[in-house]
Image: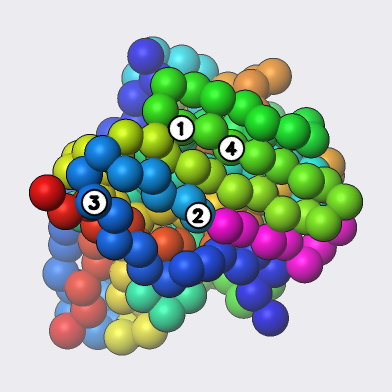
Amino acid sequence: QQKVQQSPESLSVPEGGMASLNCTSSDRNFQYFWWYRQHSGEGPKALMSIFSDGDKKEGRFTAHLNKASLHVSLHIRDSQPSDSALYFCAARNNYAQGLTFGLGTRVSVFP
Amino acid sequence: GALVYQYPRRTICKSGTSMRMECQAVGFQATSVAWYRQSPQKTFELIALSTVNSAIKYEQNFTQEKFPISHPNLSFSSMTVLNAYLEDRGLYLCGAREVNQDTQYFGPGTRLLVL
């Protein structure tokens, strides 16, 4: 069973629009979450981390974490064509150093 | 900023042969390096985690005998895929992290094709 589940699998957003991505963990030991973005032919690049309940904003990106429901989301405001990529949610627990990734959400921003 | 390089970017090997890939951290000290394999079906599979001056920890389904790793200093790590077969195909990524930092920085990956 996938311990980190992402939805939707894919998402099309008009340029300038809002993209909303979801991630849910089935392992209550996961306490630390990241969002990574991967463009074709590249490695994943860390967008932001979130460890505490509530919102965290960095530029056009806002992450929200609800530890009680083990749900984390990512919202991309004013989407740009360069935001078209695979977005991965990754989680870690207190004692492991490696990350557990979801299957990803493919975001396409169209003009 | 923190940069991670990997080489080669792409390699093809014959079934049953071995292939070594390298990972280099620039701009920070990579006290821990995690090796992953990315495939369409299984997203990122953690192969092993290497921390300088500590034993390398392999995940279930991955062994040192198949994926030996070297992490001799704070900027370099290498992993070999021994006796590669079709199921070893994929994009091999290294994620490096600095001590007291939480985020792993990834290289572009080494894509392994097995004929």
> What amino acid type should be assigned to the residue bearing mark 4?
Ala
Q: Residues within 10 Å of mark 1 (few under 14, many from 20)?
A: some
B44 or A62: which is nearer to us? A62
Mark 3, secondary structure of its residue: strand
Q: Quadrant of the N terminus of chain B?
A: top left
Q: CA distance from mark 2 to mark 4?
A: 9 Å
Mark 1, secondary structure of its residue: strand
Per the rendering, the mark at residue A14 is: 3
Per the rendering, the mark at residue A63 is: 4
- Subunit of mark 2? A
Task: Decide which of tag 2 and tag 1 comes sooner along the chain.
Answer: 2
Q: Is disc 1 on the same chain as disc 2?
A: yes
Q: Is disc 1 on the same chain as disc 3?
A: yes
Q: Quadrant of residue A107?
A: bottom left
Please give the range of residues in magenta: A22-29
> What amino acid type should be assigned to the residue bearing mark 1?
Phe
Q: CA distance from mark 1 to mark 4?
A: 7 Å
Q: Residues within 10 Å of mark 4 (few under 14, many from 20)?
A: many
A39 or A55: which is nearer to us? A55
Residue B69, percent across and down? 50, 51
